[in-house]
Image (cartoon, coloured by chain):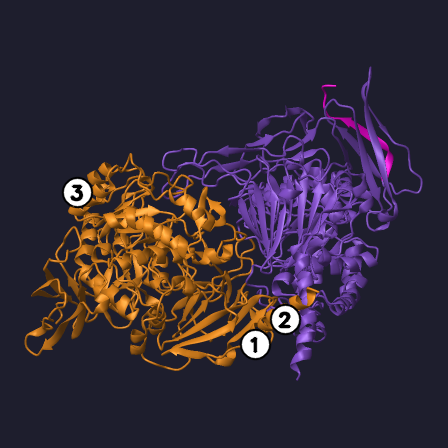
Chain colours: A purple, B orange
Amino acid sequence: MKYVPMVKKLTYVLIFFLFFDQASAQQSSWKEIYPGVWKLTVGNPEAISLLKAAGTEPNVEAIKKLPRTIFPLNQEDISTEVVDGKTYLRFPLDRGEAIYGLGLNFKTHNQRGRILDLHVDHYGGRDDGRTHAPVPFYVSSNGYGVLVDVARYITTYVGTGVRTDTKNPPVLRDRNTDKQWEALPYSDGIEMMASAKGLDIYVFEGPTPLKAVQRFNLFNGGGYLPPKWGLGFTQRVPTLYSDQDILKEVKEFEDHDFPLDFIGVEPGWHSMAYPCTFEWDQGRFPDPKGFIETLDEKGVKANLWMNPYVSPIGSLYPKVKPLSGTHTVWNGIVPDFTLPEVQSIFKEHFNTHHLDIGVSGYKIDEVDGFDRWLWPDVAKFPSGLSGEQMRQIYGLLVQKLTADWFKEKNQRTYGLVRASNAGGSTFPYVIYNDYYSHKDFITALINSGFIGMLWTPEVRSSGNAEDWLRRMQSVCFSPMAMLNAWADGTKPWSFPEVEDQVREVSYLRMQLLPYIYTAFAHYAFEGIPPFRPMQLEEGFYNIEEKEDGKLDATANPYAMAQLKEIKYQYMMGEYLLVAPMFAGETTRKVVLPPGKWYDFYTGELAGEGEVIEIEPGLDKIPLFVKDGGIIPMIPKRRQAPGKEEKLPLEIRHYGGKEATYNLYDDDGTSFDFEQGAHSWTSFKIVKHPKKGLQGTMSKPQKNKPFSYDRKVTWKFMTNSN
Amino acid sequence: MKYVPMVKKLTYVLIFFLFFDQASAQQSSWKEIYPGVWKLTVGNPEAISLLKAAGTEPNVEAIKKLPRTIFPLNQEDISTEVVDGKTYLRFPLDRGEAIYGLGLNFKTHNQRGRILDLHVDHYGGRDDGRTHAPVPFYVSSNGYGVLVDVARYITTYVGTGVRTDTKNPPVLRDRNTDKQWEALPYSDGIEMMASAKGLDIYVFEGPTPLKAVQRFNLFNGGGYLPPKWGLGFTQRVPTLYSDQDILKEVKEFEDHDFPLDFIGVEPGWHSMAYPCTFEWDQGRFPDPKGFIETLDEKGVKANLWMNPYVSPIGSLYPKVKPLSGTHTVWNGIVPDFTLPEVQSIFKEHFNTHHLDIGVSGYKIDEVDGFDRWLWPDVAKFPSGLSGEQMRQIYGLLVQKLTADWFKEKNQRTYGLVRASNAGGSTFPYVIYNDYYSHKDFITALINSGFIGMLWTPEVRSSGNAEDWLRRMQSVCFSPMAMLNAWADGTKPWSFPEVEDQVREVSYLRMQLLPYIYTAFAHYAFEGIPPFRPMQLEEGFYNIEEKEDGKLDATANPYAMAQLKEIKYQYMMGEYLLVAPMFAGETTRKVVLPPGKWYDFYTGELAGEGEVIEIEPGLDKIPLFVKDGGIIPMIPKRRQAPGKEEKLPLEIRHYGGKEATYNLYDDDGTSFDFEQGAHSWTSFKIVKHPKKGLQGTMSKPQKNKPFSYDRKVTWKFMTNSN
């Protein structure tokens, strides 16, 4: 009888199964895996996760340099459970605690009181978790961070659910008679659910929110240091531009005296796009190598647009077909990039046809969604991954794939991507999208700083010159100064009324390159976001006003209270507070953190830990410098400096304080800096009893890259000394 | 050794488990369970489902009367699979096939090309599946229906995903050069996913879309027949109104000569609300019984507002506490209504305190969501149901609970509910919400007809008299003619400029009661929606215009095509086409179905199977009658007729056709009609060679209820005969 052995066999299976089931029932305990980084494994984590997909390695040495505290939460207040194939999590919240992060949100900073379904997608106008980088990491105003590592959609209740057994129940109120009744009673917990039988949780100590973010970023390997040219200006050309059109465009930038470091070549370079061939169109680009070389002679790099969906007419198609998912995207197959074979096929093709002839990087489009356009959740992939898992990591996979090619060539790249996730901080990509609200762009730029991401408030077009100038001002104070003219061919000078002002702010960005580059070095080495939310600054951790909701039978039937957050201002680098202006607004409020703050342009005192109202005029983007702030600047130039140049430095000092600033430098293009080929140069301002403020510079370092003249112009911007 | 017996025991468990697992792997085959109703069980359906929660029984006799066709799809084109604890489904789509239903959508009718996550929630302004009745049923323009019965969120891709192995691949196009490139390539399937190890699918034959909807409705038990008073006018009073305030309000309706059949008593009747006690407030309602009796003397019923979350100060609390979920809603516990014990506790309390003293029904609020306000998905319930399962069925459970109490008393009720789902057609509830777009209200009213639901375009307030009148006109041509003044005390006469017109349309509804009541009888007996989408009418199954999308770099970067549907017009009962007007618009288009159509008010020919442009003026809501349409009307009256009345009838006939109309009647309040205590009376119009059109009425039926005078006024509205 065949029955018995089968039962025996099944018994072993069952024991195995039970073993795992017990493992999932019995929670492992918190382990400190790096200083101040704690890990808890819940149930049986899946074979793929966000961090596994990103493949980043922690920068342990840098983590060790951060200050230590203790495990920042009550461990008993964290509960985890695997129920019916889903992982349930609960983390405590304090009264007054603000929660930042949880994906790239565009409208709000503090997520407390919100429900987010963290899900890679095009941002659809609501902070509901569907966004380009739904990173399941949050940083608390209490100074710690939490990461949930699972490649699944995560439903996240940020202080909305109230348990019957809570230690901190909300006050019971009668809505009939009690005006204090609240539509959203007090909740003391964050609850999460993911459709996985297990996952890993990481808790990051602070002690401040910024330190927690730094620890998170360094755990992901630190931030990416772009090549110097990546911080210059970039123009993306209309989609059907040929090589000659592009060279003409480059010439126009010279003629109009506008900065230009790299050109974005849009879909027309492919012989077919949507889906893509990744092969040069022979009509528009008959000699790609010659084209790239000619560009290079003009100091201009080329960045190629792509989305990863392979056209049936492309040479990659037959090779990739059996290694693709069950569904197509715009008739293209969807490569399973977790398979080494797919990685090799792409690497060979892209190296041969692009990197080897000098292509500097990519724009990776449409790995995010718009939901309908990507594969559905019912899709399956040859690796065994589900549509949902692949959706959460696809942006990471394509970033890693391409980043590795450049790394192997010891060549830094800097590009654009439409989707990312936890672990993506080390990738050479800035996130962008097709949404076009200037204000929300600034909020996204700020929020990207909570979650180890970079975001550019892409400029495409404008209804009027004012809006154009305001957008160009903002983008010049962002991770990538880009104009994307793929659809309509707009140029920086397309609004002649403001051409001079646009040129001026573009050059200001170029002058600030030493400062911006140093800010990115702090991102790479210490995990400090180069574009930093105010909420990571002291005195700003949890600052917001609450306005009572007014009952309105049709518009606000539950009389919900409205939170008023401090928005639209952020820190660029160590000292600079950026407060962009928006079309139609001539004045704005700026909330200055504790201490004195000075106008960047004039050096005049702007205020001291207070809310100021400014009317900056159209020409300038409002910038404020912290007391004792030092800003290194170079002369106006059209392109980032090359390796051999020696640049004159102007060291600006603001306010009356003694101060020290460390300027970073390296070769600007290779990864040699990771092996020590970089320099930090100190600029020290001391108060001489008679002469007032005096600047000194640290001594030259032998065999260390340093691209600046030792003759420095000291400029004390504030007269009051 | 204890180990062995445990393994043995487990082996049995395992065999059991494997048995089920095999069952899930090996798909069962389609079974015809009722004529034209086919069932397929996929995997292992869960203990709870939508239909199980609703507990409705099919009206098999009525189903048998529908015409038969054959199984409407290619069975091989339907695929089902259980993957990793989730059920994946795929159904075929034909070219040009339109898909209606899939929940109570507010902006669109045809769901093809959309992704919906069917999820009980407050409607949030987008047709994304989150809505008050996310019924997983669709009806095809090809004349069949599909229901997926599972109490889970269902992600539904309605012709968006394209499989690599599709039989009908979209055309491959190069976006670079081909203007016909489409952002959403042709897809030949609906794909669905639910987080359950199995579920039941039902396919309903047509042959027309209407017949498929009828079959679906009858499968759910048929539609609900409201009591006659339920179709009169209802006013919901301000939330803190006392018994005296309400009686004064009733008097005001008399003084202003406005119809009033029932009063909605808002939260203030509870001694505490949000959470609720379900106990009368002794200050505002010292003598509930006396109050209800006084109302009753004036012919006015009382409908009590509630949400089901139990206040800690209420007498139900200690009894229900151990039978509630892990999370609170506004400090109230959430009863697990699947437990018979909870059902008994509520029944006893509600019968004693409400039904026994004459309360006529309920408004069941906030069983839908607004997401943050209900329990999170991580909630658990004592029955073992998850938060997700409970969310999908909670509205059904409370409807069933309350409906059963009235049924046991042989007393019809009619109330309001904020959430429902498949199987809810037999419940005495109309869905409403807090959203307030008049146009979207009409779209919801229409869409409710696809999915076995009723929806009221609730009126609350208006910015101006024109909007007020337009809303009042619409609500008078909806399942419940309601003004909800809970927040601001608006009365029908609050805008004196249009008081007369509002009164006029309110009375018109009262005059049409025999017609409306008959339409509901067709719903109950035959499953025909009383308020019917045009898309269920011949010549309308799949009618829409496609406008090419225009590329816009900032607003429409993918040049998406826009679909233009026929909206804002619907059928009420057999003959009446309603085309509401909206504030700010003086003209509108009406698309008349095939045949001649006549103006309801004048009897004049309006058009014939064509698009007409009308300019109806402010006073009237445009109404059109089909050629040969017969509309029975009674004189203007303030309240629905009582049992003993005999009403004069006016029988209106439109156009030139011979015709027959069957008028339904019964006692208007009890369920005796289900046992045969009802009548159908025929009115026949024939063309006499000399006298022209002549009407005759069928003979009196013995022992059958009939509330009308046998002396009928025949009114031939169209002169052309």
Front of the two marks 3 and 2 = 2
> Residue tagged by mark 2?
B11
Q: Earlier in the sequence, mark 3 or mark 2?
A: 2
**What amino acid is labelled 1 in the image?**
Thr
Mark number for residue B470? none
Q: Quadrant of residue A72?
A: top right
Residue at image point 22% right, 60% down: B670
Q: Which residues are magenta?
A: A708-721
Q: Earlier in the sequence, mark 1 or mark 3?
A: 1
- Image quarter where the C terminus of chain B lies is bottom left
Residue A537: say if magenta: no
Vertical relation: A635 (above or below) A222: above
- Residue lying farthest bottom? A1
In the image, is B105 to the left or to the right of A532? left
Vertical relation: A672 (above or below) B33: above
Residue A499 seen anywhere in this rendered image of the structure: no
Q: How would you classify the magenta stretch by its main secondary structure?
A: strand
Q: Chain of mark 1?
A: B
Q: Chain of mark 3?
A: B
Q: Earlier in the sequence, mark 1 or mark 2?
A: 2
Q: Residues within 10 Å of mark 1 (few under 14, many from 20)?
A: some
> Residue tagged by mark 3?
B256
Residue B199 placed where, x, y %?
49, 69
**What amino acid is labelled 2 in the image?**
Thr
Label 1–label 3 contact, CB within 8 A: no
> Residue tagged by mark 1?
B166
